Image (cartoon, helix red, strand yellow):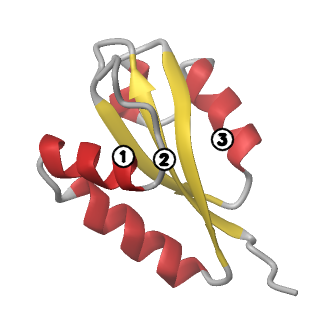
Amino acid sequence: MENNNYFFYVLRCGDNSLYGGYTNDVQKRLIKHQSGKGAKYTRFHLPVKLIYYEGFTDKSSALRKEYWFKHQTRSNKIKYLLGHGVDCRLL
């Protein structure tokens, strides 16, 4: 059985921007973002909502996915999310 201990996640920010990140605890990280104590970007784009996460067995794979996502255009980010079943109608 696979243990997904590392995660890539995507937040929809208050201004409908998309933020991608990495964590080993999705719920704990989301609470940190929502309280304004997360990444500098999300502090200034509250509120945030978790719209997607994906588990990985190793940290480097999760970090590679985060890096890839952050370097995509907005339209490519939305295509990626749509391809993974995320409802993007509000974006």
Residue 11 in the image: state x and y as whole percent.
46, 34
Residue with the mark numbered 2: 85
Q: How far separated are the C-alphas under marks 3 and 2? A: 22 Å
Q: Amino acid at mark 1?
A: Leu
Residue with the mark numbered 3: 29
Q: Is residue 6 left or right of residue 46?
A: right
Disc 1, disc 2: CB below 8 Å? yes
Is residue 37 shown above or below 78?
above
Q: Amino acid at mark 2?
A: Gly
Q: Amino acid at mark 3?
A: Arg
In front of the other: label 1 or label 3? 1
| Disc 3 crowd, CA 10 A, few/some/many (<14, 14-19, 20+) | some
Secondary element type, mark 1? helix
Residue 60 in the image: state x and y as whole percent.
50, 82
Secondary element type, mark 3? helix
Q: Nearer the viewer, residue 85 or 48?
A: 85
